Every structure is written in structure tokens, then in C-alpha cells.
Image (cartoon, coloured by chain):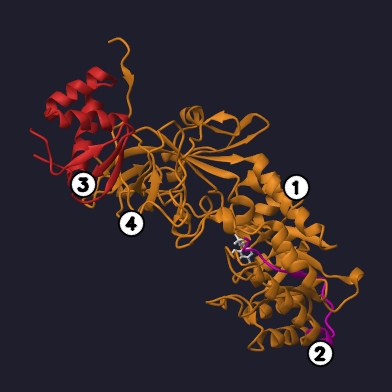
Amino acid sequence: MELQFKSELTISESGFLFDHATGLTYTLNSTGQFIFRNIQDKQNARSILSLVMNEFEVNEDTAHKDLDDFIRQLKEFNLVGE
Amino acid sequence: MINKKAYSKPTIIRHSVGVQNKFGRPPATVPINRLDGFKVSELAEKHGSPLFVLSVKALRDRYRDMNRAFTTRYPNFQIAYSYKTNYLKSVCNILKQEGAWSEVVSGFEYDIARNIDVPGNQIIFNGPYKTHEELIRAFEEGAIVNLDNYDEMQVVEEIADELDKVLEVGIRINMDLNDPPWHKFGFNVEAGHAFEAVKRAQSGGKLKVVGLHIHTGTYVDDVTVYSRAAQGLVNFYAYIQEQLNIKLKYWDLGGGYASHNTLHGAYMPAEQTCPTFDQYAEAICPILLNGPFQAQDAPKLFIEPGRALIDEPFSLITSVVSQKRLPSGQRGVLLDSGMNIMSSVQWYRYNFQTAQDSGAMLEDTIVYGGLCMNIDVLQASSSIPPVRRGDLLVIHHVGAYNISQSWQFIYLRPAIIAIEDGEVHVIKKAETREYVQSFENVPDSFISNK
Ligand SMILES: Cc1ncc(COP(=O)(O)O)c(C=O)c1O
């Protein structure tokens, strides 16, 4: 599954996200930022999952469920499409 | 596997006006790890979740604070705790220890008070429906009885005949103090009904009116309502004294004092709007003391607080069962407690605080109760940090009405514990199936015989 940002987005060091198309702003926590930057690096969902598990102390079930939920939310905010 | 970072659920939160309010962003939640010194997680592990927790110290402090506020302003004052708010035996006992009398509104509540040895003459018997037998017992035991309607007055006159003595009674009155006014109980002053009722009671020769009772409403956070009620009592007393030569032994201003819970639709949080006990007492006592009497003849002043005493001392520990994303984008979190044990969610906008560090990223969340019913929503919109199944939440100020109004439905009702001086006491065990079904009987002919 290829993930793509729908518009130009800028994210700061602290996880503050600005959507240039809509002017809306968001905050991401550290795990959210990690996933976000990997989407920027054109990773697909499956590889992001293994990257998360390499980076953080978390089991696969939890990481998978949380990643799905996170991506679903990015889609609902209309930030990401496939 | 070396040095992996600690994981937290990934979150993204949209900054919207909805999450903010007039006072800026909601405060980051501080986790409630402990209740009265005990770890929330250990309490839940030992006694189950959900779990009601009573801080006995908080209860005693609330009582003492309220009592101090009024006794320092009125010479002859007595709190009568409103049993219906929470009549757990431990609660009734603790308040009895502190010096409270009991305000009851049914024969069942009367019996609860007598069962823990509250003397009859320290019980105020109110309410619109008291049976003949209950009234006889109350008069024989010297209880204070406030009459609600003419049918009841007639029954009490019959009892006066049976007992062959003149019975002292109070009359419940109401006034047009709030909108909508409370007209269900007692006799209305403005319409002249209250005067008629006092006159009628007095003129039969069987009753002697010695008290007036008014209860202006519940969660009345406007102290001027009490001032107007107090002025109304003073005026009415002056009138019946002059017209009917009535001398009151007591007047009773009822309950209704607000607790530190925020009502739905309230603009500001209760921390900023809930009057102090001193403010209530100051709104009431000086006016009453201007009544038609010498200071040494001041009628005894009763008040009947419920929620203001018992809301704050109780907390509920509850667990996250699941969460999901709604089509609207809002997060939904479902808990193991429902409105069957939290009926006051219909009044209050509760705060749900996590018992563990969940980060400071709050997200607008709909909080569902665990009942398999669509209406079981504990909060339509609450700011909650990331949580996962099994995480514990704490809800404060849940002592009033939730326990006495709880219904056994779908699930068994949880245990209730009390903490005092570093000790945990189970004051009500969690229900069991056997307990719930113990009064049932299945006739043999209903049982399939194979
Ligand atoms: C007669 C009377 N007294 C006292 C109370 C206690 O009210 P609250 O819990 O609002 O203090 C009630 C409750 O409605 C009541 O009906």
C-alpha cells in the first residue's frame, strides 16, 4: 500500500504540522512524527510497521493496530491518500 | 534489541476551535496514580474494576466545613443529611459520628436510619408518600414530620386520634423561586395555599404547626435563591404568627447546595462557579436572624444537604475496554462502567483522568459506557490523552445519587471501598449472580424434565 501526502505539509522538530493547502495545523507525538517522516520517505505501510518495531519497544499486534488507526486518521484528516 | 525507545501510541491532533474554549486550551491532564495514598492500579487489581472509592477524610472534611460555616452564623443549627443521595450504611454511620441527623423520604430510608441507631427524634421524615404505619412509627418515636399535602394531613389527624394526643407537625411549603418553580411538593405560598394549609392544620385541634420546610431545588449554585427563600420564610412566619399565633420550633431550608461538578451546558467549570459553604451560609443566616423573634427564641435551623456533602468524597476507577474511530473522525472510547452505575452523567460533564502517564496530547473523545445500549454515553465530548485497552481512568466527585440510583442491568454492580488512615475497607462487596437471583423462585412446573 503506497501512501502519499495530498498537499504540501511542513513539520517542525517538535511535531507541529502545517498544511499549506488548508492552513490547518496539527500536533503529532513522537511515534506519530516517526511514522510521518517515513511516509515522507516514501515507505509503504508494511515497511513502516517493521521500522516502528525496530525503533520502539512494542509488540507486533499493538504496533499494527495503532499504525492502522493512525493511517486511518491521516486519511480522515484528508492528509494522506493511496 | 538494545536501547529501543519507549513506545506510545501514535497520535495526531488537529488544532481546532472545538478543542479550545474561551479559556484557551484545556489543561494537560495530570495522571491520578493514587487515591488517598493507595495506587489506583493496585486497588483495581485487588477489588476489581469498576470500583467506587470513598475518601473518608474528604467526607468528614466536607461535613465539618459546612457545619462550621453555618454554626458560626446561626445559634441553633443542625445538618440533616439527605439519605436518598447515598444511603450506604457506612456513609450514614460516618455522618452520624460527625453529628448529622437524618433526612429521610420513605419508610425504607427511615428504617435504614433506625437500624444504625439514629434516635427517632434525630430523623426528619419528608416526602410526598408516607404510609399510615410509617407515620405512626415516626410519631411514636418522636421524629420530625413535614406534611406534603391534605391527604397526608388527614391521615395524620387520624393518627392523632389513635394515639390520643395533639401531634406536632411541620408544613412543606414552596415558593416561586426558580424557573421552572418546584410546585410538586408542599403548599404554594404565593397562591395562598401555604397559609390555608397552616390554618387548616391548626384549626382541627389535632395538630400543632411547629415547623416550616422548603426545598428550593437541586444543584442550586445561585446563592440568591437561598436568600429569597430565607426572606420568604421570614415573611411567611411573621404572617402566620400575627394571624394564627404560630410559634415555630424549627425551619428547614432543605438541600440543593452545589458540588464541584460542572453541569452540561455550563459556561464555566464548577471550580469557578460552585459557591463555598460560607457563601451559602452568609446568604441565608443573617436574613433568617431578622425574623420575628428574640435571638434566644430563634427557631432551630435545619438544612438537608445531599450532593454537596457526598459528591466530592467518592471517585470511580474504571477501565478502557476498547476504542475506535467514528465516521466523523472523532475518537470513541468504551469503558467497563455504564450509566447504570453513573446516572448523574445526565447532569454532569465529568472529567476522565488517566491513572497512568499517557502523555499530554489530549484528543476530543466520545466516552461510551459498557452497556449494550446505544444510549449509554457517559460524555459526548471529553479531552482525553491516548489510552489503550486495560488502561485505568479515574472520575472524581461521583458520590451523589449514582450509587443509590444504580440499577443492576446486564452486569453485576461493582464493589465499594472506603479509605481512612491508611486502611482500605470493603464497605460493599461486588454483586454475585447468586445475590442478584437470591429472591427469585422458579416453580417446579416451569422446569423441563428430561
Ligand atoms: C426534601 C429534600 N431535601 C434534601 C434533598 C437533597 O438535595 P441535594 O442532593 O440537591 O442537596 C432533596 C433532593 O432532592 C430533597 O427532596
Q: Which residue is mark 1?
A: B98
Mark 2 is on which residue type? Gln
Asked if the residues shown at circle 1 and circle 4 are in contact, with their CB atoms under 8 angstroms apart, the answer is no
Image quarter of residue B417: top right
For the residues beneath circles 3 and 4, the answer to whether they share a chain is no
Kindly tell me whether residue B378 is visible in this rendering.
no
Image quarter of residue B241: bottom right
Q: Which residue is mark 4?
A: B375
Q: Which comes before the other along the chain, label 4 or label 2?
A: 2
* Left or right: B373, with B293 as reference point: left
Residue at point 78% right, 80% down? B237
Pointer 2 residue Cβ closer than 8 Å to ligand 1: no
Q: Chain of mark 1?
A: B
Where A46 sits versus B206, above or below? above
Q: CA distance from mark 1 to mark 4?
A: 40 Å
Q: Which residue is mark 2?
A: B243
* Left or right: A6, with B419 as reference point: left
